[in-house]
Amino acid sequence: MLRDKKLFLLDIDGTVCIGQRLISGTKEFLEAVKECGGQFVFITNNSTRSIDDYILSFQKLGIMTDYSNFITASFATVQYLKKNYSGKLIYVMGTKSLMRELKRNKIRVTTDCMDPEIACVLVSYDNQLTYEKIQDTCQILSTRDVDYIATNLDYVCPIEFGYDTDCGAICQMIEHAVKKTPKYMGKPGTAMVEYALKLNHYSKEKTLIVGDRLYTDILCGHRAGVETALVLTGEATREEAEQCEYGPDYIFRSVEELYQKWLNQ
Ligand SMILES: [Mg+2]
């Protein structure tokens, strides 16, 4: 039952925000969730921004959040690297913000493709991408037998004018050159959902994953055994959702309609 949901795991881009603009109904919905003793956690594949960046940008939109409200693909990446590459050197093709987050978590990072110690290549959404970075990454992946991971497989990211290129598309470009595909960390992998459930002590039955995309958000819920709601403010259409084999449990025009249905059911 929709009314019983207490923990909302929300995607950000295309679900509650388009670029820097908040989708209407979001603020009222999040406040109502808190008032009824529930919790909301943003689980996002966007790895250009750290949790500190997100707290600040939501504050500007009038929404007060703290660390407990965010789990990002870069966070999932950090957990993976800590577990599997403790003390080893990671070559990073990503933003300065991501580099800072990795360093803060005591992960050894480099952007020098000639470093002989590199154990793993990490590729991320990178709005500071240059051709030199692409070439350096291709050089390592072509000439060495190192592991290769990426933060998220999204091909595009919604922005004010339409769509921007995301990590999955950058990885496809590299794949054409080096014939290698990375292991992806974010949704539809279930690490972020499992972590959110562990931290917040709600059952899967009381949890709802909300997102705008079938192949990441909705598939993630399907794999994690958590109910999903698709909002039509981003990438997927109602027709695509109805034809999808792992289709969502609920479809709403926007987060505003989800809020109304949740309140009144
Ligand atoms: Mg999205």
Image (cartoon, rainbow, N blue to C red):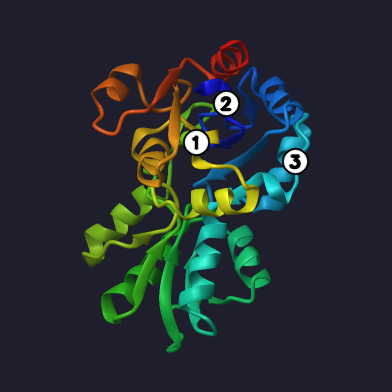
Position of residue 139 relative to residue 171, above or below, is: below
Q: Report whether 130 appears left or right of 66.
A: left
Please give the name of the residue rendered at 44% of the width and 67% of the height, measured from the top-left corner: 122
The 10 Å Cα crowd at callout 3, few under 14, some 14 to 19, many 20 or more, is some
The amino acid at mark 3 is Thr
Disc 3 secondary structure class: loop
The answer, for residue 114, to whether it is visible in the render is no
Mark 3 lies within 8 Å of ligand 1 (Cβ measured): no
Pinpoint residue 220: horizontal percent, then vertical percent: 40, 43
Asked whether 233 or 226 is in front, the reply is: 226
* Residue bearing the label numbered 1: 205
Pinpoint residue 103: horizontal percent, then vertical percent: 64, 72
Q: Are marks 2 and 1 in contact (CB under 8 Å)?
A: yes
Pinpoint residue 203: horizontal percent, then vertical percent: 54, 42
Asked whether 105 or 143 is in front, the reply is: 105
- How much space separates mark 2 and mark 1, taking CA atoms? 8 Å
The amino acid at mark 2 is Asp
Say whether disc 3 or disc 2 marks the residue closer to the N-terminus: 2
Q: Quadrant of the C terminus?
A: top right
Say whether disc 2 or disc 1 marks the residue closer to the N-terminus: 2
Dot in front, 3 or 2: 2
The answer, for residue 74, to whether it is visible in the render is yes
* Residue bearing the label numbered 2: 4
The 10 Å Cα crowd at callout 2, few under 14, some 14 to 19, many 20 or more, is few
Disc 2 secondary structure class: helix
- How much space separates mark 1 and mark 3, taking CA atoms? 24 Å
* Residue bearing the label numbered 3: 65
Dot in front, 1 or 3: 1
The amino acid at mark 1 is Glu
